[in-house]
Image: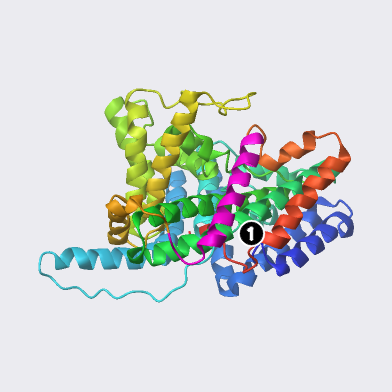
Amino acid sequence: MLFNSLNFAIFLPIVFILYWFATKGNLRLQNILLLVSSYFFYACWDWRFMFLLIFSTLLDYYTGIKIQEATNQKKKLFWLWLSVGINLGFLGVFKYYNFFAESFAEGLSLFGFKANLGSLQIILPVGISFYTFHGLSYVIDIYKNRIKPERNFIDYSVFVSFFPLLVAGPIERATHLLPQILKKREFDYSKAIDGLRQILWGLFKKIVIADNCAEFANTIFNNSDDYSGSTLVLGALFFTFQIYCDFSGYSDIALGTARLFGLDLLRNFAFPYFSRDVAEFWRRWHISLSSWFKDYLYIPLGGSKGGMWMKIRNTFIIFLVSGFWHGANWTFIVWGFLNALYIMPSIVFNTHRNNLDIVARGKYLPTIKEFFAIGITFSLTVFAWIFFRAANVTHAFSYISEIFSSSLFTIPHFPGIGKAVFVAFLTGIFVIIEWIGREQEYAFKIISAIRLLHFRVILYYAIILSILFFGNFSENQFIYFQF
């Protein structure tokens, strides 16, 4: 059930009405309804994977309690590693087995050996990377004595499978979401309105910008041998805005939907394309994943405390793991390695925390220095996205080699270029709105500061009409569903 589908447009109001009116404010009934709704939502993808979700939930629920009850460190470690091992085992089989088998066979072939390990004809369960990380953070936090295990299975299950975040995040922490699930919730009109506003902005990002950009990004990337370097640059730019508006649009809809039910999810994006260096970009892009790797991988590895060598080593590890988390393809690993290289100068010269605040706060425009810093960071990001989007590493290098050829200086041309110009125009307007609203939690929230009701209504209608007239209603899946 896609957020940008008619089914979800029917599903959400029904759950909302039952949640606030049929339960009569009873917390237990509200949580039961959220759990049933979440399981129904997930079953709409493929009901067979419900068993995997429920098993993973039961595993972490039980091992969390056993970790707490363990009488010595050895037993605590046993239950922790049981949970971690089984969770990562399932993730490895479903997501990475074929990749490792094929890579191993190719490696042996270089030495003249032939190996036929076979591949598994299995479907990747939607959301498995996200709910696996929910459970892992939960049991690790119990082991570290950051939280107590939740004894109510329904409440814990809601934390793992809450439908707005179930299939593509944000990756929640038990320390943040569980206390909200356990606390009595009352309807807040202003919170609900803000949620609807963020949902509307997320739909605009997805349907108007991301899905329209996807049409041309797919055309150019899938037929890159037929196009000039200048056209390939446009393809990379279209994908750059596609992936941002697709994923941050999903996150906006997820956060807005959760707010309708009185719950606040972790912020996942903070205007990353306005970053002045790569370190700032990674503080603003997929924040819940970046912070997860920092807390559960980077810091346990020693973080920045062991000298420059350890800092460099740990940085490369988390970026390579982050790339691998995104998918079983060498392109993602190269993408992670490239970002690690990008961030190295700021690590070595200790400038990675120079840009903690939003750019040009309280100003209309950035300084010349900030403008060029944003441009350089954005260009590096666009280049890295080529590896993320390419079918394989060979395709990526072929794509890049054509960009850096004499055809870069020709006039771009591809089917539908007239419509592409219009989509680029809409994307330009989107960037302006994002810039104006960059100091808010999400750009369109700036409308709440407008006092004139008539002007606010006009802007709401402008967004709604732009979705209706310019939106792509093909019900395209969100990119991060594949991860």
Q: Which residue is drawn at the image coordinates 29% and 26% (left, top)?
A: 308
Camera sees residue 160: no
Neighbor class of circle 1 (other Cα within 10 Å; few <14, some 14-19, many 20+) is many
The stretch of residues the image draws in magenta is 413-437
Residue 419 shown in magenta: yes
- Hey, which quadrant is residue 454 in on the image? top right
Nearest the viewer among 247 and 465 is 465
Percent from the top left, x then y, of residue 460?
78, 48
The secondary structure making up most of the magenta span is: helix
Q: Is residue 11 left or right of 177 when viewed as pictured?
A: right
Look at the image and say whether residue 392 sits in the magenta stretch: no
Left or right relative to 18: residue 97: left
Residue type, mark 1 in image: Ile
Total marks shown come to 1
* Position in image of residue 179 (x %, y %): 69, 41
Residue at the spot x=46%, y=44% of the render? 76
Q: Quadrant of the N terminus?
A: bottom right
**Residue 325, position in %: x, y?**
42, 53
Give the residue drawn at x 32%, y 38%.
341
- For label 1, the SS is helix
